C-alpha cells in the first residue's frame, strides 16, 4: 500500500491520503484478500483499488453508488477532490428510489460545492448482493466511467470473500475501473 502526499485543490490544501492497492486475486502479483480486508476495515481512510489495466489521466466520468448509508457518505466525502475535477458525475441508486435514500439531498449538497450531478436509478430486482454488484459493474461499464465511488459494506461474522457484503465483494473482485471505497 502506498500513500500519496496531500494535493492542492482550488479551495486550498485538501488531504486526500488514500491507500492504493491492486485488486486481490490468485495472481502472485496481486495483493492478498486479507490485505484488502485490513485496508478497508482498519485504516480509517479511503482505499482505492486499481483494476489490472488502469487507465491514465483524470477521472472525467465518475459513478457514485449511493444508498444513503454512513459508508457511502464517507466515500463521497473522500472523493470530493476527484468529483470537483470530473466533468460528468452520476449518483446511482440501485434497488430503491432516489428519494428513499436521499439522493436529491446529496445532489443538492454536492451542488453547494460547485459539483453538478445527475441522478439515475437501476432496479436489479430481488436479487442477491453479488447480483446487485454485477448490476453496478454493468452500469459503470455501460456509462464508460473512469471511477466508481462506493461505501464498503461489511457484515461482521460472515465468512464470504473479504468479510464484506456480497455487492461490495463482487465489485472489488471485478471492477474494470479504479474503485474508491470507504467503510
Image (cartoon, rainbow, N blue to C red):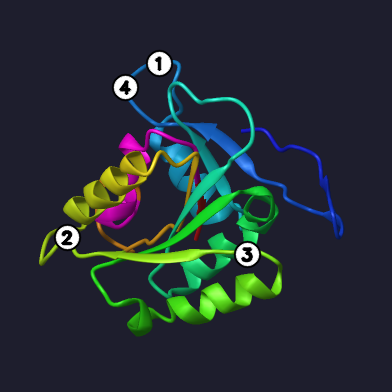
- Taking the magenta stretch, the answer to whether it contains residue 178 is yes
Q: Where does label 2 land, which residue? A: 124
| 91 up-or-down from 47: above or below | below
Mark 3 residue element: helix
Tell us which disc is closer to us: 4 or 2. Answer: 2
Q: Are marks 3 and 1 in contact (CB under 8 Å)?
A: no
Q: Position of residue 116 (x, y in %)?
A: 59, 64
State the separation of the CA atoms marked 4 and 2: 29 Å
The numbered mark, 2 or 1, whose residue comes first in the sequence reads 1
State the separation of the CA atoms marked 1 and 4: 6 Å
Q: Are marks 1 and 4 in contact (CB under 8 Å)?
A: no
Q: Where does label 4 land, which residue? A: 26
Residue 90 in view here: yes
In the image, 46 versus 84, the foreground residue is 84
State the separation of the CA atoms marked 3 and 4: 32 Å
**Range of residues picked out in magenta:** 163-179
Q: Residue at x 49, y 61 (%)?
A: 183
- Taking the magenta stretch, the answer to whether it contains residue 165 is yes
Mark 1 residue element: loop
Q: Where does label 3 land, which residue? A: 77
Tell us which disc is closer to us: 3 or 4. Answer: 3
State the separation of the CA atoms marked 2 and 1: 34 Å
Mark 4 residue element: loop
Mark 2 residue element: loop
**Residue 28, label in figure:** 1
Q: Position of residue 74 (x, y in %)?
A: 57, 66
| 174 up-or-down from 44: above or below | above
Amino acid at each position: 500500500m502506498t500513500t500519496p502526499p496531500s494535493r492542492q485543490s482550488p479551495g486550498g490544501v485538501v488531504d486526500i491520503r488514500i491507500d492504493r492497492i491492486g485488486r486481490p486475486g490468485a495472481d502472485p502479483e496481486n495483493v492478498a484478500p486479507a490485505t484488502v480486508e485490513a485496508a478497508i476495515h482498519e485504516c480509517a481512510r479511503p482505499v482505492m483499488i486499481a483494476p489490472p489495466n488502469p487507465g491514465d489521466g483524470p477521472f472525467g466520468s465518475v459513478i457514485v453508488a449511493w444508498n444513503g448509508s454512513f459508508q457511502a457518505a464517507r466515500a463521497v466525502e473522500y472523493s470530493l477532490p476527484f468529483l470537483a475535477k470530473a466533468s460528468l458525475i452520476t449518483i446511482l441508486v440501485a434497488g430503491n428510489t432516489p428519494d428513499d435514500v436521499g439522493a436529491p439531498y446529496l445532489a443538492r449538497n454536492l451542488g453547494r460545492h460547485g459539483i453538478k450531478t445527475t441522478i439515475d436509478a437501476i432496479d436489479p430486482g430481488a436479487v442477491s448482493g453479488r447480483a446487485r454488484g454485477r448490476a453496478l459493474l454493468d452500469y459503470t461499464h455501460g456509462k464508460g466511467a473512469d471511477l466508481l465511488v462506493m461505501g464498503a459494506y461489511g457484515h461482521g461474522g460472515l465468512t464470504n470473500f473479504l468479510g464484506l457484503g456480497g455487492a461490495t465483494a463482487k465489485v472489488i473482485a471485478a471492477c474494470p475501473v479504479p474503485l474508491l471505497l470507504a467503510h
